[in-house]
Amino acid sequence: MIKDIVIYPDKRLKKISAEVSEFNQELHSLLDDMYDTMLSKKGVGLAAIQIGIAQRVLIINLPEDDSDDVIIKKEETLEIINPIFTYKDGLCKHQEGCLSVPGFYEDIERAEHIIMEYQDRHGNKQSIENKDFLAIALQHEMDHLDGKVFVEKLSILKRKKFEKEWKKKHK
Ligand SMILES: [Zn+2]
């Protein structure tokens, strides 16, 4: 089911999400709703808090190329529960956007190389190592689980400009 996206600066985006302990039907429905919602907005990643659920759950589905007719396959969606970074190294800068901050894009500095451990929808332990755009997307979504939105990583000047324009646009 497609859910409403929580839009910045909604206070729910500041919540620290709780660990998932039961890998049951409720979790599976949440993952399915997140997938439907992400797909409907043509997003590449979504954290549960972005549909108002404060649990450590995120999904990512990176299209293989930039053309408009890429088909997103559900079985290729990464479903990540209770993630932790066990390794982070290097620095890189990429343009990021967020379904909770629609229409705004900015370069953000992140670690270049990551290793993440997490659980899948059945509670099985998994890990991912990445040095590419997936590493960036994982760091962006992980921030949501800790109550952070990417605009908080902007320089003071850029942040002020953003807040002013955002307020004007969302009056
Ligand atoms: Zn986001």
Image: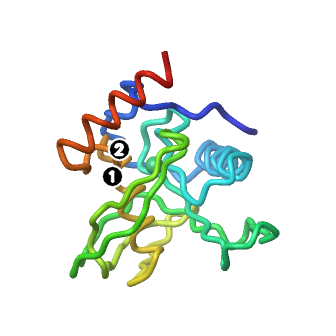
The image shows residue 20 at horizontal and vertical percentages of 43, 49
Q: Residue at x 61, y 66 (%)?
A: 61
In this view, which residue lies farthest toward the top?
Answer: 171
Asked whether, in this view, residue 13 is left or right of residue 72, the answer is left
Q: CB at mark 2 closer than 8 A to ligand 1? A: yes
Which image quarter is the N terminus in? top right
- Amino acid type at circle 2 is Val
169, above or below 155, in the image = above
Q: Residue at x 41, y 49 (%)?
A: 56
Q: Which residue is mark 2?
A: 149
90, above or below 153, in the image = below
161, above or below 98, in the image = above
27, above or below 74, in the image = above
Q: Residue at x 44, y 22 (%)?
A: 168
* Mark identifier at residue 12: none
Numbered disc 2: secondary structure: loop
The image shows residue 11 at horizontal and vertical percentages of 36, 25
Asked whether, in this view, residue 155 is left or right of residue 77, the answer is left
Categorize mark 1 by other alpha carbons within 10 Å: few (<14), some (14-19), many (20+).
some
**Residue 21 in view in this figure:** no
Q: Which residue is mark 1?
A: 143
Quadrant in the rendering for residue 76: bottom right
- Amino acid type at circle 1 is Asp
Sequence-wise, the earlier of marks 2 and 1 is: 1
**Residue 85 in view in this figure:** yes
Is 130 or 30 nearer to us in this picture? 130
Quadrant in the rendering for residue 122: bottom right
Asked whether the beta carbons under mark 2 and mark 1 sit within 8 Å of each other, the answer is yes
Q: CB at mark 1 closer than 8 A to ligand 1? A: yes
Q: Residue at x 33, y 31 (%)?
A: 163
Is 37 or 162 nearer to us in this picture? 162
